[in-house]
Amino acid sequence: TKLSSISKGKKKFPNRSLVNQKQNQTRTVKVFLSSTFKDFFNEREYLIKQIFPKVKKLCEDRGVFFSYVDLRWGITEEQASQGRAIPICLTEVSQCRPFFIGVLGERYGWIAPGDDPVWDELIPLYPWLSKHRGTKSVT
C-alpha cells in the first residue's frame, strides 16, 4: 500500500520544488494528546516513544515540522490551583486544530464546579461550554 511504502522509507517527497517555493512558510503538524493521565499512562508513553518519532520522521521527509502537546508536563500545581488548567488546555487544543488524539476509557476527567469563575472567563471565548457548565469534564 501507499502508506506502507512511505513508512518503509521507499517513497520520498515527490516534488522538492514545492518545499523550496514555500521555504519561508513553515508547515506544521501540532497534535494535542488528550486522556485522563493516570489510567492511560502506558498508552501515552507508547505514542510518545514509539509512534510519534516515526510520524516526526515522515513529516520531516516532507518538509513538515511535527510536535505534540501532552499537558501532563504543561500545567503547574500553581496554575491548577489558580483555576488556569481549563483555559490553558483549551488554548492548546485551539492551537493544535485540527490535530487532536482523544484516548477514551472508563474514567472521567475533573469537572469544574458550576460556580467556578473560570466559566465566566471561558464561555465568551468558547460558547459551547455554556451547556456543560459544572456538569461535564471539558479537558
Image (cartoon, rainbow, N blue to C red):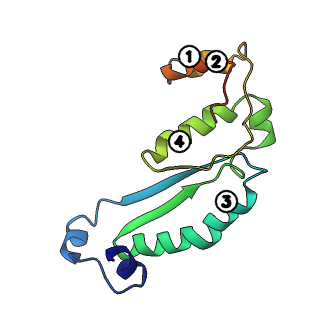
Query: Residue 12, how many percent across, how many down?
Result: 30, 81
Type of amino acid under label 1: Ser
Left or right of 120 on screen, residue 19:
left
Q: Residues within 10 Å of mark 4 (few under 14, many from 20)?
A: many
| Mark 4 vs mark 1: in front | 1
Label 2, label 4: how far apart the Cα atoms are: 18 Å
Query: Residue 2, how many percent across, how many down?
Result: 32, 75
Return the residue at label 1: 130
Label 4, label 1: how far apart the Cα atoms are: 18 Å
Instruction: For the residues labelled 4 and 3, say whether their Cβ atoms are less than 8 Å apart.
Output: no
Label 3, label 2: how far apart the Cα atoms are: 28 Å
Type of amino acid under label 2: Arg
Label 1 or label 3, whichever comes before in sequence order: 3
Label 1: element kind: helix
Label 2, label 1: how far apart the Cα atoms are: 5 Å
Which residue is at 50% across, 22% downward?
Answer: 128
Question: Residue reaching furthest top?
Answer: 115
Label 1, label 3: how far apart the Cα atoms are: 30 Å
Which residue is at 35% across, 60% downward?
Answer: 26
Quadrant for the N terminus, please: bottom left
Disc sitting over residue 11 in the figure: none
Left or right of 43 on screen, residue 99:
left
For residue 94, above or below residue 125: below
Label 4 or label 1, whichever comes before in sequence order: 4
Label 4, label 3: how far apart the Cα atoms are: 17 Å
Return the residue at label 2: 133
Type of amino acid under label 4: Val
Instruction: For the residues labelled 2 and 1, say whether their Cβ atoms are less than 8 Å apart.
Output: yes
Residue 86 occupies quadrant? top right
Type of amino acid under label 3: Arg
Return the residue at label 4: 93
Label 3: element kind: helix
